[in-house]
């Protein structure tokens, strides 16, 4: 099976556990099936045919970061970690999927209009960008 994209990210969630944003330092376009298999084996996850978001621990992130040849900074993360695997270039259905696609553009792995972002604005939440990072608008008064 071929895969469209993969990324190990660190993000922000609101108090309900909903993703507000995700940063992918080194997204991969068209990762090899062998690499995806190694990663899913490391996480003891049976990869399906669809898109996958796996919240992962710091120790799991360290193992995945090693497979992706990333530095070990993920092992010291204080924010939630997520591994996102996109099987296809379908419309983004979640915040991690949308941000992975945006990072593919930012890292110049795809050309403008070269990735399907249809419906993205319906998926991404409105957030307040502050010096503390993204904050859910409903939670902003309590954080001020």
Image (spheres, rainbow, N blue to C red):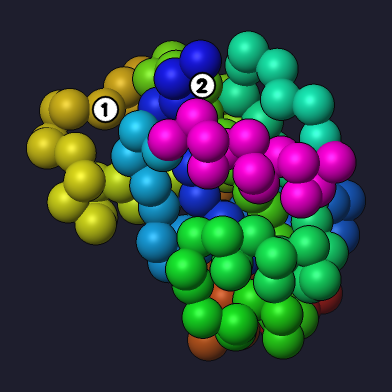
Which label sits on residue 87?
Answer: 2
Boundaries of the magenta span: 32-44
Picture layout, residue 93 above or below residue 139: above
Count of labels in the image: 2
Picture layout, residue 122 above or below residue 133: above
Where residue 110 appears, as percent x and y from the top left, is 19, 39
Query: Does the stretch in magenta take in 39?
Result: yes
The answer to whether mark 2 and mark 1 are in CB contact below 8 A is: no
Is residue 74 at all visible to an observer of this figure?
yes
Residue holding disc 1: 115
Q: Name the residue rendered at 70%, 17% in the picture.
A: 48
Question: Where is the C terminus found, in terms of image quarters?
Answer: bottom right
Is the magenta region chiefly helix, strand or loop?
A: helix
Q: Name the residue rendered at 40%, 27% in the picture.
A: 4
Q: CA distance from mark 2 to mark 1?
A: 13 Å
Which of 141/9 is in front? 9
């Amino acid at each position: 099976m071929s895969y469209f994209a993969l990324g190990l990210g660190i993000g922000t969630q609101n108090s309900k556990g909903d993703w507000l944003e995700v940063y992918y330092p080194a997204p991969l376009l068209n990762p090899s099936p062998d690499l995806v298999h190694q990663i899913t084996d490391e996480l003891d996850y049976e990869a399906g045919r669809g898109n996958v978001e796996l919240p992962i621990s710091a120790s799991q992130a360290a193992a995945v970061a090693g497979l992706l040849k990333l530095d070990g900074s993920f092992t010291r993360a204080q924010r939630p970690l997520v591994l996102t695997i996109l099987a296809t270039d379908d419309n983004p259905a979640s915040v991690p999927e949308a941000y992975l696609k945006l990072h593919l553009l930012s890292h110049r792995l795809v050309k403008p209009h070269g990735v399907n972002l249809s419906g993205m604005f319906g998926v991404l939440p409105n957030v307040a960008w502050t010096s503390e990072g993204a904050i859910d608008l409903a939670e902003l008064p309590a954080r001020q």
